[in-house]
Amino acid sequence: MNTNTLDKLRKMKFFGMFHAFKSSVETGKTNDYTADELLAVLVDAEWDDRQNRRIERTILGAKFRYKASVEEVNYHADRSIDRNQIKRLADCTFIDRFENIIITGSTGIGKSYIASAIGYQACILGYRVFYASTPKLFAKLKMAKADGSYIKEMARMERQQLLILDDFGIQPFDAQSRAALMELIEDRHGKTSLIITSQLPVSKWFEMIGEKTIADAILDRIVHDAHRIELKGESMRKKRSVEPEFSHQ
């Protein structure tokens, strides 16, 4: 009977129940439970398994550059990171309020790590997240214009509850990229959230975006009431090359 039950659980793709019941049978623990206790154990196992697989799919779909964790953020004094601010942002309620986060600082200081860590936390909490290198994203959108997939790509961006634009402003925007950025921001404004990382201080973004009218419109939607994290200190990559044990961002 147990063999048949296990076979049916596997075929129905109740993998959490399958593994929990199989373990209980093999260890002889099925006799330790009442019927309702065993049912509760199996349902909990199935629930946890489905939740974990959902999180894995969400993280995979987000296409993060690397794995990051809020718990691993380094709060060394010279970095000027407010631990309480990071913890508040990690609850991801800023996404429910359609607010943005702007993270600025010099190269190698850990901007991408913090953005990704908050993004990972959002995935765990069930939000739809997408990470993109800004230069690569807009190069891809240019190609999409050429091959007819532009509308599909923009719609995919709009569906994300949190869009992470990493390395924003590494290169100035040309007319086509500027128009795509304006469309992207306009489609998402007041409906979803952004995390933007940049080596440039916000005061330099106007010049980097170019075209006064468009730059004004974009910055008004991005910067207004955004949460700001301004990182200071020495490059983390340089520190790691000197201190091998220094592993956290």
Image (tube, rainbow, N blue to C red):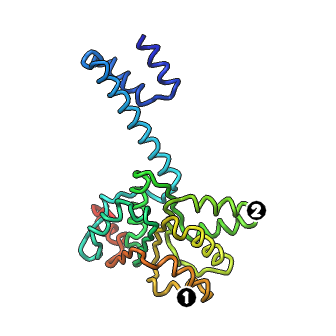
Compared to residue 159, the image places residue 26 above or below, namely above
Q: Residue furthest top?
A: 1
In terms of depth relative to the viewer, which is nearer, 99 or 245? 99
Query: Relative to residue 156, is residue 108 depicted above or below?
Result: below
Kindly report the distance in space between the C-alpha atoms of the residues bearing marks 2 and 1. 31 Å
Q: Quadrant of the N terminus?
A: top left
Tell me the quadrant of the picture where the C terminus can be found. Answer: bottom left
Amino acid beneath label 2 = Asp
Q: Is 5 left, or right, of 34 in this rendering?
A: right
In the rendered view, tell whether residue 53 sits above or below residue 198: above
- Quarter occupied by residue 171: bottom right
Vertical arrangement, residue 98 with respect to residue 232, above or below: above
Percent of width and height locating residue 206: 53, 86
Residue at the disc numbered 1: 207
Q: Position of residue 118 (x, y in %)?
A: 39, 61
Amino acid at circle 1: Glu
